[in-house]
């Protein structure tokens, strides 16, 4: 028996499927043919100001030669050796509202090196220890060395890394200033 209603429904369903297929293929063709390389557009407006850089953080290597050491009779007792060096990054502004960090460059036997933050004490023998420290004034760095037994032997050439931080940069930074590697990374300093 022939059911015209069923055939009409099947015909509509097939026509809809065909129409959907044609629409999908047409859309795909339009999409593919519309993708072409265009010339770059006009540049947009200037972006917002980025975070502050390290313009107020400076570092410099300071070489202390054997001939730079002078004996200083400490009025509090004992003898110190002091090497005074001119360091331009230690400005009066840094002295009054910033900070200065000094690191002694220590060399491994294989040629590698690391930086030791000052002040620090190096134990030479069970009865003697050497303390390295520093003091500053505008444009001046004083390196102080004292031995607990006042022997003060073997003062040679040293290299120190000096980092001067303006006071404005101190307020929002959590940095371990005893770790030069962290200071270098945080403030993007050259070695």
Image (spheres, rainbow, N blue to C red):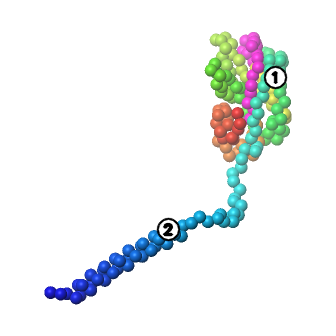
Q: Is residue 154 within the magenta segment?
A: yes
- 36 w.r.t. 62: above or below: below
Res 166 → quadrant: top right
Q: Residue at x 71, y 49 (%)?
A: 52
Residues under labels 2 and 1: Cα distance?
75 Å
Q: Is residue 185 within the magenta segment?
A: no
Query: Observer-nearest residue: 181 or 9?
Result: 9
Residue that badge 1 annotates:
83
Answer whether residue 37 is visible to the viewer in this image: yes
Q: Is residue 27 left or right of residue 166?
A: left
Q: How would you rate the neighbour count of disc 2 (Cα within 10 Å): few for under 14, some for 14-19, many for 20 or more?
A: few
Q: Nearer the viewer, mark 2 or mark 1?
A: 2
Q: Which residues are magenta?
A: 146-163
Q: Residue at x 73, y 30 (%)?
A: 161
Q: Could you tell which of marks 2 and 1 lies nearer the N-terminus?
A: 2
Pointer 2 with pointer 1, Cβ within 8 A: no
Mark 1 secondary-structure assignment? strand
Res 91 → quadrant: top right
Residue that badge 2 annotates:
32
* Residue 133, image x, y percentages: 74, 25
* Residue 33, image x, y percentages: 52, 69
What is the quadrant of the N terminus in the image? bottom left
Query: Observer-nearest residue: 28 or 103?
Result: 28
- The total of numbered circles placed on residues is 2
Mark 2 secondary-structure assignment? helix
- 33 w.r.t. 10: above or below: above
Res 99 → quadrant: top right
Answer whether residue 72 is visible to the viewer in this image: no
Q: Residue at x 75, y 32 (%)?
A: 162
Q: Residue at x 76, y 20 (%)?
A: 157
* Residue 27, image x, y percentages: 46, 73
């Amino acid at each position: 028996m022939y059911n015209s209603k069923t055939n009409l429904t099947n015909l509509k369903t097939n026509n809809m499927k065909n129409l959907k297929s044609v629409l999908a293929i047409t859309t795909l063709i339009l999409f593919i043919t519309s993708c072409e390389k265009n010339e770059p557009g006009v540049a947009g407006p200037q972006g917002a100001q980025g975070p502050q850089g390290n313009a107020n953080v400076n570092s410099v290597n300071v070489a202390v030669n054997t001939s730079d050491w002078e004996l200083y009779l400490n009025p509090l007792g004992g003898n110190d050796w002091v090497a005074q060096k001119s360091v331009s990054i230690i400005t009066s502004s840094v002295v009054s509202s910033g900070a200065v960090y000094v690191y002694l460059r220590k060399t491994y036997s294989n040629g590698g090196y690391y930086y030791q933050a000052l002040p620090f004490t190096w134990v030479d023998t069970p009865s003697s220890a050497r303390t390295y420290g520093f003091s500053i004034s505008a444009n001046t760095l004083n390196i102080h060395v004292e031995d607990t037994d006042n022997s003060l032997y073997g003062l040679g050439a040293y290299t120190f890394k000096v980092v001067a931080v303006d006071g404005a940069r101190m307020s929002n930074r959590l940095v371990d200033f005893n770790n030069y590697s962290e200071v270098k990374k945080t403030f993007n300093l050259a070695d």
